[in-house]
Amino acid sequence: MRKFLSLLLAVLMIASLSGIAFAEETTAVGTPRTETLIVETQTPTDVPGQFNSYMQGTQMGFGIHQLMSAMMWEMDTVKGEQFGEVAEGMPESNEDFTEHIVKIRQGIKWSDGEDLNADDVVFTFNMIMSNKGISQCDYYNTVFASIEKVDDYTVKFVTKESFPRLALKFGVTIWGNDCRIVPEHIYSKVEDVTTFKDSEPVVAGPYTVKAYDELGNWILYERREDWQNSTVGVVTGKMPQAKYVWFRYLGDDTTRQMSMINNEADILCEVTPEILDVMTSYNDKIACWYNEFPYATSDDPCSKGLSFMMGKAPYDNVDFRWGITLAMNFDEISMNVFDGVGRASCFPILTATSAMQELYYKPLLPWLENEFVLDLGDGTTVKPFDSGYAARMAQKLGIKGTEDELIDMFGIGCWKYDPEAATKLLIKAGLEKKDDGWYYNGKPFVINMTYLADTEAQAGRGVIAAYDQLTKFGLKCNLSSESSATWDTNAAIGSYDIAGYWPTGGITRDLYSQINGWDADLIVPLGERGSGQGSRWNNAEATEIIHKLAKVSATSDESYELGMEFVKIAIQDMPFIGFHSGVKFVPTNSTYWTNYPCAENPYNGPWWWWSCFKYITTEITPAA
């Protein structure tokens, strides 16, 4: 297949006259190529010209939140620490964390020259709280008693209860945050902000919209002439190097590869190892996070694996979930996903990023290896943890390194492949094994397994690999893909059995922002949308910890101890089977631009789709 793909690309390259890309110094949108950073977006938008983040359907990842949006607090992805963007620093709270003073950073101006100040912050929060058409409305009203202006650059937040995580909850920790400050002098004049497209947006970020495709395939951004007054300019004092950033939907995988090989794109969002192999064989300017194996970074905080719908039986039974876990050979799954590339992320909910490995994974190794056992229901037990995974994968792939290096690359371990124990656990959970298969409540038992089509290859391949494992074990499974039009809805209302969702994370020492959605008090009946995790994990101990954690300082030792206790409970109850941490092959092309973040220069992660991308634009420099 790979040879056929290579041959096909070679033919297409001749047909496309690839030399034109070098001869012409003007892009298809009329900008100088040497001044234009071209970034892929995974999907086109159905609402071209819509830039209001509070209007339903706005595709924020189309460069909108990466280049224009104003966040209260942003994230340093290397240190795992937040810093103030619109806010000057972190909140100053009273003793019981019910009153919070936030200083607004002075010097930021909207792109029309108006100052960004306390009026904009107070207006934005109150706009959300007073508008039922904004999805965050109800939650904001459960948190805040009032948001008031103290002076032009000071805001007082009063919360209804102790709330020590104002910045973590209303600022960026990973991808972005749904709290984006809007210009009061624009939005206050709009009758209904939820129907205001904002096609000519006034922004605080370093780029404005210069043009967009009426069909929704691209948006061209231009650096503000007064970039010094933008969020990035005021925070860093640095100028984004590209005068233009062109976000483009490139099409299918073959077209994406052609665009990159022909230097018609500088950054792709995500590819598979096979695609990377083909591209680098044709263009030596294309690279990933590492220049050699494993090529990809494993520090995207969204681990991929299997999500259970725990709002119905038998998926609500911990013995069933552990039975499914031990019925699968993770070594084989790993090879079928990305040829063994990736760090095992076996803990439910908490992803094995480098930081989380040091904070939570490694400290729990003695407990996993020596104390953690499963009751198989017949008077026997099993220790389910397998710490030999890294060494096995290194030997299989011919990778050399110290024990620490291999653990960093492949993880601390995985769950054992133990069909005998899996059989006992499924029987304990109420299933019955007959000559013609498994039964539940007297009927043939069938698992419906789903994954998202076309994007998130890691998640999709993981589900397919799991399907192969479970059918080999003897379970009857149906496998199907879903379009993005139904995927999120089915997750929210609980319309699935086992699916490739990724309700995981982990980037900060304090886990509250990651785990608070697993609060069982937020569970709603199947078929309804709630504000918690759609998988409907009902664990009283975990919920109690979440409630305790909400009232504890994020920087305290107690916060960490509660987080560790939560992780143990999650492991014991297995609400999600983690396969790998987020493995990202995110290729860059250094023909026109260099100094992308990489393993040798990790000033940031390769997170083009996160809001922190605007801080990467100051570092990416012209190749010339």
Image: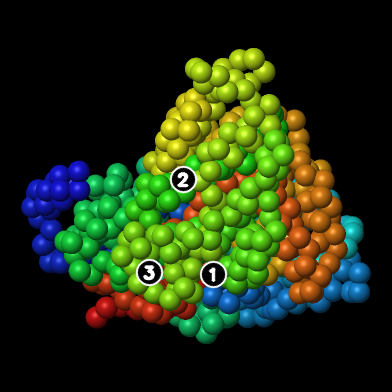
Q: Residue at x 42, y 41 (%)?
A: 465
Disc marking residue 289? 3
Relative to 526, is 488 on the left or the right? left
Q: Is residue 576 above or below residue 467?
A: below
**First in residue order: circle 1 vs circle 2:** 2
- Which residue occupies the foreground of this view, 624 or 200? 624
Q: Which residue is mark 2?
A: 329
Q: Residue furthest top?
A: 442
Q: Residue at x 49, y 25 (%)?
A: 476
Q: CA distance from mark 3 to mark 1?
A: 15 Å
- Which residue occupies the foreground of this view, 270 or 438? 438
**Numbered label tally:** 3
Residue 112 picture location, percent across and down: 55, 68
Disc marking residue 354? 1
Relative to 610, is 269 on the left or the right? left
| Number of the front mark, 3 or 1 | 1
Q: Quadrant of the C terminus?
A: bottom left
Disc 3 residue type? Trp
Relative to 210, is 413 on the left or the right? right
Disc 2 residue type? Asn
- Rendered image quadrant of residue 90: bottom right
Q: Does residue 229 show up?
A: no
| Number of the front mark, 1 or 2 | 2
